[in-house]
Amino acid sequence: MSKKLKEAMDSELDPDVTEIKLDIDFNKVPLDQLLEYCKHHDYKKTETDLEKKPLKSTEYEKFIKDEWECKFMKPLSLDQVAALLFAAEEMRVPALKELCCACFASHLKGKDVETLKKEFELADEDVDFTFHARA
């Protein structure tokens, strides 16, 4: 279940309340997809069962173990995956967020910087190639 929705439901004191207002601004389509994902998993899936990182393949079938999830994600464009990722982050659905991240990462895997700059229409000044060591 969405951690954000659960918190909102738990904080409601009136049992007759049938509507919960969430202060989130995103498109209805990814929200519908998020609900479809949650319903499919009976609102219980909190962790993903993806292939371990790093991804060994760009093919969804190779790293998404759940057949339904693979069919769910496969037809989505990269923009749709990004919108669903945003919805999963905002609604705090960690398993879906990780699934979206893996699908997005698989799209980037193996591509060089120049290819990605062209694909995402980035100019050199839009890209910071400075790497910082972790403390």
Image (spheres, grey):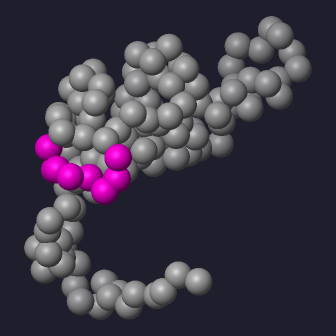
Is 20 located above or below residue 82 in the figure? above
Q: At 27% from the left edge and 21% from the top edge, which residue is drawn?
A: 68
Viewer can see residue 76: no
Residue drawn at the location 46% of the way across and 87% of the way down: 132
Looking at the picture, tell me which residue is in the foreground, 62 or 37: 62
Q: Is residue 67 left or right of residue 10?
A: left
Q: Picture coordinates of residue 112 (x, y %)? A: 14, 75
Where 116 sits versus 28, above or below? below
Q: Nearer the viewer, residue 34 or 112?
A: 112
Looking at the rendering, in which quadrant would you find the C terminus? Answer: bottom right
Q: Is residue 112 left or right of residue 31?
A: left
| Residue 56 on the magenta segment | yes
Residue 41 in the image: state x and y as whole percent. 45, 18
Dominant SS in magenta:
loop
Using the rendered view, name the quadrant where residue 90 is placed: top right
Is residue 64 shown above or below 58? above
Q: Is residue 21 above or below residue 114?
A: above
Tell me where residue 3 appears, x and y as whole percent. 64, 34
The outermost residue toward the right is: 13
Viewer can see residue 68:
yes
| Left or right relative to 1: residue 88 | left
Residue sticking out furthest to the top: 16
Which residue corresponds to the image point at 17% horizontal and 35% vertical from the top-left?
61
- Residue 57 magenta-drawn? yes
State which quarter of the image contains the N terminus.
top right
Residue 67 in the image: state x and y as whole percent: 24, 23
Residue at point 52%, 40% (across, down): 94
Q: Which one is nearer the viewer's eye here, 50 or 15? A: 50
**Count of numbered circles on the image:** 0
The front one of 115 and 19 is 115
Q: Which residues are magenta?
A: 52-59
